[in-house]
Image (spheres, helix red, strand yellow):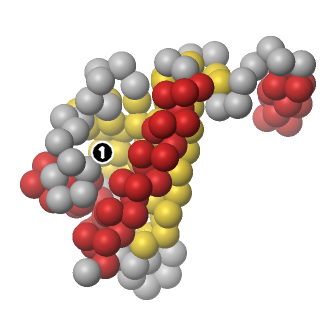
Amino acid sequence: VGPWWQQMVTVGYEQAAGLRKKHQKPTGFEISRAKTIAAPSSKVFAAWKSARMRAAWLSDEAITIRKATAGRSLRITWSDGATKLDVMLYPKGVGKTQITVQHGKLASAKQAASMKAYWGKALDRLATVLES
């Protein structure tokens, strides 16, 4: 594995040559979504960590939190048992937090597109719950 810029050039070349699809990684497909909401990171973290609070915005997904660092990040196994989430929280001034969700090990480009849309809507629901 070379420097980061070499990896970017390689990915760009492979995509241009038709050897790699958009969002494709060696372990499958990976997407990310981000949203800044008007809530402190402690409140956003609690909305992910607490099953009761999570039910208000993430429907009935049975996730497994593998690792959590209060107010900063969560490593999650998704309800399908095969795909993984990395949730990062970045404080952005008083009472604001940027949430970044990376969903990896997806099986196909179609699943990646579906999950990208899913996370856009889920983060909108989270914002609605925490900002009201």
Number of numbered markers: 1
Residue drawn at x 33%, y 36% is 76
Question: Could you say where residue 120 lies in the image, as x and y percent from the top left?
Answer: 46, 54
Question: Could you say where residue 81 lies in the image, as x and y percent from the top left?
Answer: 29, 21
Residue drawn at x 24%, y 57% is 57
Q: Is residue 113 left or right of residue 22?
A: left
**What element does badge 1 sit on?**
strand
When asked about the image quadrant of residue 72, the answer is bottom left
Residue linked to disc 1: 68
Residue drawn at x 82%, y 33% is 8
| Picture layout, residue 38 above or below residue 55 | below
Nearer to us in this view, 89 or 23: 23
Residue drawn at x 49%, y 46% is 117
| Picture layout, residue 19 above or below residue 131 | above
Tell me which amino acid carries mark 1: Ala
- For the question of whether residue 66 can be seen, the reply is no
The quarter of the image holding the C terminus is: bottom left
| Picture layout, residue 123 above or below residue 30 | below
- Residue lying furthest bottom in this view? 94
Dot 1 alpha-carbon crowd within 10 angstroms: few under 14, some 14 to 19, many 20 or more: some
Question: Could you say where residue 83 lies in the image, as x and y percent from the top left?
Answer: 40, 25
Question: Could you say where residue 53 lies in the image, as x and y percent from the top left?
Answer: 15, 59
- For the question of whether residue 113 can be seen, the reply is yes
Q: Is residue 90 left or right of residue 59?
A: right
The quarter of the image holding the N terminus is: top right
